[in-house]
Every structure is written in structure tokens, then in C-alpha cells.
Image (cartoon, grey):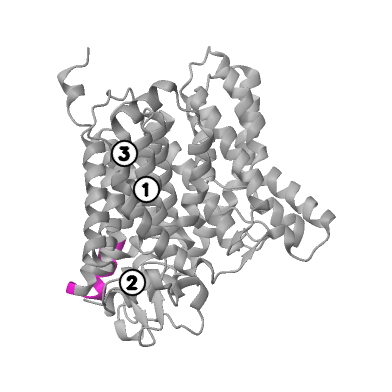
Amino acid sequence: MLSNRQHRPSHSIENTLLVLFCSPVILFIVTWFRIPAAIFAGFGLLLVLWRILCCRVEESDSRKLSRIDWCLILLVAVCWISLSGTAGIGFQNWDHEKHNAMMNDLVRKDWPVRYESDRFLLVYYLPYYLIPAFVGKAAGWVAANVVLMLQLLVFVTLTLAWLVRRAGARGRFCILATVVLFIFFSGCDWIGTAYHKGWPVFPKHLEWWTRFNYISVTSQLFWLPNSAIASWTGTALFLDALERRSLLRSFIVWLITLFWCPYVAAGMLPFLLMLRFSLDDWEKYLRIDWRWTFALLPAAFLGIAYYGSKSSGIPFGAIWMQPSSIRGFAFDYVKFLVLHVLWAAPFLWYFKRKIGIPSELWRLFIISCGILIVLPFAIAPGINDFIMKASMPALLVLAVAVITVIVQFLEARHDSPARSRQSRWVMSVLMIIYLFGSLTAVHEIGRSIMRYQARIPPFYSEDRLPVLKPDWVPLQYMSEGSSLLRFLLRDSAP
């Protein structure tokens, strides 16, 4: 029999993340689409969100984090994002020109954003920017960037806290180890760069040493913060939904992720399709939750209409279709997979027997490996962007699996099989490979530190910021818009 405490609505990291994840999507729907469409879609999302948050669930067995634990995680998160260039703090790589221009246009222009007397529409992954830009409309450019930094800090802190609990870390040392291991998780790009181009000069961006590219965790934050938050939050919530065996929760998380980044949502879909739900799960869904799914259809329709309006303007392609020899492609493919994916498999297989990795985590690891093995053969619009972003959920699962093994090894009793002499040797080899992989993040962080600066003006001088220009970004960020989308969008209004 469940206790009274267990019958109350669940208050957890996952539910907090879910509310924060949904909020900018609801704002997007309300401010960009005509009132009838916005009411149906926004109310449907709120209804399903309320239903999910009020579901009765059993208490988690994982230990609650103390205030000191939270302070430790928060401190690491502050140090990490202060090097990312977000909000003009620290070094900004060239990709931030797009982020700054996007934010600047959202602050200055009426919503929905249009260009060249309504010829072009802004069609991009906007939820990451919307709440800061909404504040910026009332309080100015500086306030918008302050809110952007705070928003990023909240998402990163909660993601790290979720990871600590997911890995089962206990004690200050293991909590810190979990967070640091995540920040430095990467494939062995240093080895690939050294093999192809010679010894890398510090600090060099290492991740384009071959035609494929799965980017490291730190590079995701420094280069693609909008997609990184979509991936980390969406995947964390998706795994939580699968663990709860809740199809309705899985559907709404996937739909919200679609608004945040369609490519990331594409990378999450195989987990839902390949994980088998029990007959009891389907019976519960068909008996209770299936009616609630209909409330998500208006928002799904708007999301598909919005992103579908420019999909035809982005050329489809595939890495293997590009001019090169089959032998060269196959050689690059094998090297890439070994250095980015397959290196982890023997270690997890070994410690699965020694530590007893949960079967669910092992299945997730196998699925993530399968996704990462198949992705280089994908045919998709904007193929390089697609592969980079669609791989992010699988890379997060891979990171969770490897970090969980390391943390469980550190916490195992000294007389257990996990800490035998053979296991210590295997773990030593794993950590050596991990250190080679961490050099990717070392180079990224090193470049940010060496070129660090707190940007005052001209960054905070709004009239000197870049703006999106139709002559150089029409395919990525803009669309002439389909007749359906133009019918659904509201008239531009502040």
C-alpha cells in the first residue's frame, strides 16, 4: 500500500525540467499563431501537462541531493557555462554570430518575425531564445542576455543533477566525478586528428578530422547551446518517461523536443520505437491515456506545418553519396566508429557481469550504439547538421552508461568482484581511453580560457549587433513559407 506521501503529485527534477521545457513552446504557440489555433494547441499542451504532473507515482529509490550537493553542482555549472560565450560572457566562437543575430532580431522585430516586406519568415528552432527575447522586448538587450544566461544555468544545473541521480552517485567525490566526467565526455578526436593531420596544436578545434562528426558534450554547449539543451533535457525526460512506462509522457516529451529541435527529436524516436512496452503498459494507455493524446494533435499539427514549410528548401543529401571512393568511405567509417562508439562496448560488457548494470540501461546502450552506427548512412535535409544533432540523444545515453559504470566501480566494496585485480586493470584501460577522449573538451575549454573576456560594449550596444540577412542565411534560418503556414501565422505584433 502506498503511503500518503507517495499519493501526492510527484515533485522531482524531471517534473521541474518538464515544466521549464514546455514553457517556451507554449509561449511560441501563443505569440506566433492565430488565436483559434493557439488556443487549441496551447490548451491541449497545458491539459496533458497537468495530467502528467498530477499522476501518482511511486517514490524514487535514488537518494535526494543535499543542499551542499546542489551547491557543488551549481558551482561547476556556473564555471562551465561562463566559458561558453553565452550572453557575451567569455570567448564566442564564430557560431555565436548566429545566436546573437537571432536574439537581436527577436528582441527588435515584431513577432512572428518577417523580412523584406513579408517575403521571408523566420523559421528556426526558437524556443531557446523566446523567453529571454520576450523579456528583452520590455527591458532591453542587456536584460534579454541576463535571462538567457540564467535560463541556460538552470537547465544545465538540473541536467547535471539528473545525471548524478541517474548514475547513482553518492558522496561528494562521486558527485563531482560524475559531473566532471560528463563535461569531458567525447570520442577520441585527438587520436583521429593526430592520425590524419599530425600532432594537434593547442588549443585546436578537433572534431572535423574526417567526413563524420559526433560532437563532444562541451562542444555541444559551446557551439550549439540551443540544440544541446533540447537534447539533454529532452533525452533525460524521455528516459524518465520510458522508465515510468508512460506512453503519454513519452509522446508529450517527444513533441516538445520537436519544437525545440526537429533533428534531436528524430534522434530520440528510435528509443521509443525499439523499446518494448508490456501488455500492462498498453492496457493502461488504451484504457485511460489514449483520450489525452488527442489534446496533443493541434500542437503537433502546428509544429509540422512550421518546420515543414522550409524542409523542401533544404537539399537532401547523404555522406556516402558525396564524391569519394567506396574504400575511402569505408575506412573513414570504421575509424570513426571505433574512436567514437565501439571503444565503450567491451568495457560495458565486462562490467555488466561484474557490477550488474541494470538491464534497461544495457538495452538503452545497445540502442544508442545502433543509432550511432546507422546515422552516417542517413539521407536527410542538411545532412551534416542532421547527423550532428540527431546523434546527440544517443551520445547522451552512451555517456550515461559509461559514467554509471565508472561511478559504480568507485562506490563498489573493495572485496567485491568489481574491484578485483582484473577489474582494476580493465578500469585503468577504460580511463586511459577516456582521458584521450577528454582532450577534445580540454582544447575547447583551453581556447575559451586563453581568449577569455567579459564583453561589455560593443556587445551590449544593440545597434552594433549582427542581424540575420536573407542574402547569407536563407536556407538555414528563413523560409518563404508555405501557404498553410502563412494562413496559420498571426499578423506581426509586438
* Crowd rating for badge 3 (residues with CA inside 10 Å; few <14, some 14–19, many 20+): some
State the CA–CA distance, disc 3 to disc 1: 20 Å
Type of amino acid under label 1: Val
The reply to whether the magenta stretch includes residue 455 is no
Q: Which residue corresponds to the image point at 22% horizontal and 62% vertical from the top-left?
A: 36
Name the chief secondary structure element in magenta: helix
Q: Earlier in the sequence, mark 3 or mark 1?
A: 3
Q: Earlier in the sequence, mark 2 or mark 1?
A: 1
Residue 203 appears in the picture as rendered: no
The reply to whether the magenta stretch includes residue 143 is yes
Q: Which residues are magenta?
A: 138-148
Q: Which residue is mark 1?
A: 76
Mark 2 falls on what kind of element?
helix
Does residue 178 sit above or below 192 in this rendering?
above
Q: Is residue 396 left or right of residue 20?
A: right
Q: Nearer the viewer, mark 2 or mark 1?
A: 2
User: Considering depth in this image, is 216 or 314 the residue closer to the camera?
Assistant: 314
| Quadrant (top left, top right, bottom left, bottom right) of the N terminus | top left
State the CA–CA distance, disc 2 to disc 1: 46 Å
State the CA–CA distance, disc 2 to disc 3: 36 Å
Q: Which residue is mark 3?
A: 14
Residue 431 appears in the picture as rendered: yes
Does residue 329 sit above or below 52 in this rendering?
below
- Image location of residue 64, percent across then percent down: 28, 29
Q: Which residue is mark 2?
A: 487
